[in-house]
Image (cartoon, grey):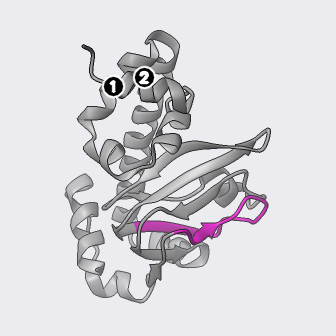
């Protein structure tokens, strides 16, 4: 499992000078059952997560409705950045939507990796650059495209269509569950 994280990191940052042994002492494996939450709103995030296999939904509550913010699938390396960075209570929940295996890195272990392995900083920087670019594109999509186009764009990412509940997907793209049902129906 460590090798999968290392392979993913080296794909993003080819100059990464870090061995499996370096990661082994800083990373823990965790099996997560479908429906289990690895972060709850109100708690402080103190881990980075790497999805070895499985899937997670990141969501928040608004007027007692669950609003899906993002989904994390295999090879996704993430954290709840605001809570992690500022050590303040999270607004988000992170819940397994499938049986999953993850690797976790505590805040103190992450600091250890960053101080001992400067190339790990390069990986994190590139990882967050890619994440930021995706976020900018999502915002632009919401600002300029109708719901049908936002839904159609998801077909470039089949995991979203095949592995998520329709109600969770609809909240992520900003439409009602019923509107998504209409968009999904083939036209006659």
Quarter of the figure with the N terminus: bottom left
Is 84 drawn above or below residue 91 in the view shown?
below
Q: Secondary structure at mark 1?
A: loop
Left or right: 162 with respect to 135? Answer: left
**Towards the viewer: 29 or 188:** 188
Q: Confirm or deny contact between disc 2 and disc 1 (CB under 8 A).
A: yes
- Residue visible at 38% across and 66% down in the picture: 51
Q: Secondary structure at mark 2?
A: helix
Is residue 138 visible in the rendered image? The answer is: no
- Residue visible at 59% across and 70% down in the picture: 38
- Residue visible at 55% across and 27% down in the picture: 174
Q: Give the magenta part as a residue range.
A: 35-50
Is 178 drawn above or below residue 70 in the view shown?
above
Q: Is residue 146 magenta?
A: no
Q: Position of residue 18 (x, y in %)?
A: 29, 74
Is 63 drawn above or below residue 42 in the view shown?
above
Q: Which residue is denoted by mark 2 in the rendering?
A: 182
Q: Is residue 43 magenta?
A: yes
């Amino acid at each position: 499992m460590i090798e999968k994280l290392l392979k993913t990191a080296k794909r993003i940052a080819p100059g990464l000078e870090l061995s499996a042994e370096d990661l082994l002492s800083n990373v823990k494996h965790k099996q997560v059952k479908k429906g289990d939450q690895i972060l709850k709103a109100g708690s402080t995030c103190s881990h980075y997560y790497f999805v070895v296999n499985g899937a997670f939904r990141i969501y928040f509550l608004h007027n007692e409705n669950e609003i899906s913010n993002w989904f994390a699938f295999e090879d996704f390396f993430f954290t709840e950045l605001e809570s992690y960075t500022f050590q303040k209570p999270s607004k988000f929940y992170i819940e397994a939507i499938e049986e999953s295996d993850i690797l976790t890195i505590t805040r103190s272990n992450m600091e250890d990796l960053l101080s001992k392995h400067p190339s790990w900083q390069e990986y994190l920087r590139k990882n967050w650059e890619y994440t930021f670019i995706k976020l900018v594109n999502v915002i632009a999509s919401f600002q300029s495209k109708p719901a049908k186009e936002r839904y159609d764009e998801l077909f470039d990412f089949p995991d979203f269509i095949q592995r998520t509940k329709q109600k969770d997907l609809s909240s992520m793209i900003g439409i009602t569950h019923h509107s998504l049902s209409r968009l999904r129906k083939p036209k006659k």
